[in-house]
Amino acid sequence: MAEPSARNVSPQHILIDGVLVAAAFALFFRLATTHVPSDDPMQIRLWSAYCAACMSGVFWIAWQMLKAVYRHQREAAKADV
């Protein structure tokens, strides 16, 4: 069985991921506010935040998958050389 590789987790990576997800949340929140069918500002903010939270979660998962694939490709290229 293959040995598990070391995880590349550092405070810097966590901070970068957090900033990207916060920026995605802000973008999704802003975009979602125009699509809430209500005139009540509190309801618009509430449902926009729910929507943006779900979409930010999907963004976070996709970002983690992209980083994992990139790391794997980079390690495979090193192994070929």
Image (tube, rainbow, N blue to C red):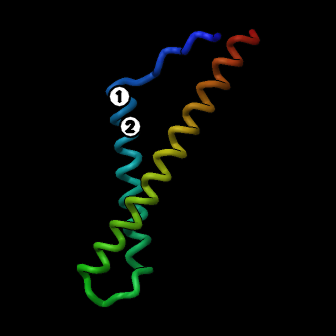
Total numbered labels placed on residues in the image: 2
Percent x, y of residue 69: 62, 32
Q: Which residue is mark 1?
A: 12
Tell me the crowding category of disc 1: few under 14, some 14 to 19, or many 20 or more residues within 10 angstroms, Cα based: few
Residue 47, compared with residue 38, is above or below; it is above
**Residue 80 sits in which quadrant?**
top right
**CB atoms of marks 2 and 1 within 8 Å:** yes
Q: Residue furthest right?
A: 80
Q: Residue at left 61%, top 30%?
A: 70
Quadrant position of residue 78: top right
Q: CA distance from mark 2 to mark 1?
A: 6 Å
Residue 67 figure quarter: top right
Q: Amino acid at mark 1?
A: Gln
Mark 2: which amino acid? Ile
- Residue at (32, 27) in percent of width and height: 11
- Work out which residue is located at the far front of the displayed protein and give it: 1
Quadrant containing the C terminus is top right
Q: Position of residue 62 (x, y in %)?
A: 54, 46
Of residue 48 and residue 4, the one placed in the foreground of this image is: 4
The circle drawn on residue 16 is 2
Q: Considering the image in quadrants, where does the N terminus appear?
A: top right
